[in-house]
Amino acid sequence: MQDVTISVIKAEIGGLVGTSRVHPELLEKASRLLKNAEGDLLIDSFVTHAGDELEFIMTHRNGTEDPEIHGLAWSVFLECTETAKNLRLFGAGNDMLSGGFGDNVKDTVPGSAELEFAERESEPVLIFMADKIRPGSWNYHLYRMFADPFTTPGLILDPALAGGFAFEVHDCVDGRTITLATPTESYALLAYIGAPSRYVVRRVRRRAEGEEIAAVTSDLRTDRIGGRYTGKDDPVMIVRAQDGFPATGELLEPFASPAIVAGWMRGSHHGPLMPVALYDANCTRFDGPPRVACLGFQVADGRLVGPVDMFDDPGFDRARDRCHEIADILRVHGPFEPHRLPLAELEPGALDHVEEEFGKRWKPLPR
């Protein structure tokens, strides 16, 4: 049977009361439009949201970066943008570039993660969706999922995992890529991905015959490569589970320990990444704290069986409580680092107005 592709494509096209959530009319309209494409271009689809990110989960057999699939998503986003404008939603159409849909889907669609694979007898897949975070925020979790035996005992107990995994890392500053293997190159890998503002894990593959794909994250932040900010924050991630990959519980375990990520208010603050059920994936306090939701599906002949709301579990209550405590500690710092991001990590031009007004008043220090 031909391989199946899961495409998760997302965009901010208008927030309900600021940037807290997506209006139900947008969810309903997008779901209806994608359902109309099933049986033709798509096999199956599911529409949801994380904060103010409208998320499309689609299955098909066209492979990754297919212009028809991305063109469909683009057209649905455009139609939903019109609804967002009619509802006077905040930032309606923010992520829709004015140039229209082009040949290079990476330069057009606001953000996507795609994973193509041959279905196993049982194919569990986890879709992680976040709001108020930046690319690189998954680095910590992916390392713990696929390289840390304290999180994933299958690396020791399961012969199918014993060979380790290969991490494809992208450099957001110099526009280069490297693949590092675990466990043999774990220290070098950590040296890079421990700086998530620059180095981003893009894909993880199993180190076995064929190097089967295990996980993929969404497009990189282009403002660090080309000097433009094009709405590629708030990344998504697709991860395969079980039978040669970490178990579902091993993949979720990293989120039981709050990680501090960049993003939050105005994309300019550090905050704890809080795992939440989908009904709590609405960012309010200081436009946050940063949220991550996870939907689990069984993929059966390309059909999405589910979803299961993976963080709708009291097992993550303590993680959520600790996130509140960490948020309180960081918020006390107000405009000071480490709550506010370092100057080099703020969105381009964030403090230009200050230098324009006061820059001429600086004087050289006496020697």
Image (tube, helix red, strand yellow):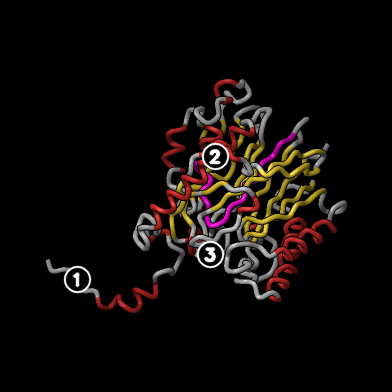
Q: Which residue is mark 2?
A: 142
Q: Earlier in the sequence, mark 1 or mark 3?
A: 3
Q: Which residues are magenta?
A: 123-142
Asked if residue 301 lies left or right of residue 142, the reply is: right
**Percent x, y for residue 48?**
70, 55
Residue located 21% across and 74% down the image: 363
Q: Earlier in the sequence, mark 2 or mark 3?
A: 2
Mark 2 residue element: helix
**Percent x, y for residue 197?**
45, 52
Q: Which residue is mark 1?
A: 364
Question: What amino acid is at disc 3?
Answer: Tyr
Mark 1 residue element: loop
Q: Earlier in the sequence, mark 2 or mark 1?
A: 2
Are there few (<14), some (14-19), or many (20+) residues within 10 Å of tag 3?
Answer: some
**Percent x, y for residue 28?**
77, 61
Residue located 57% across and 37% down the image: 315
Q: Which residue is mark 3?
A: 229
Residue at the left extreme of this rendering: 367
Residue at the right extreme of this rendering: 39
Does residue 267 appear in this view?
yes
Q: Alpha carbon of mark 1 to alpha carbon of mark 3: how far?
A: 33 Å
The label nearer to you, 2 versus 1, is 2
Taking 81 as reference, is 147 above or below it? above
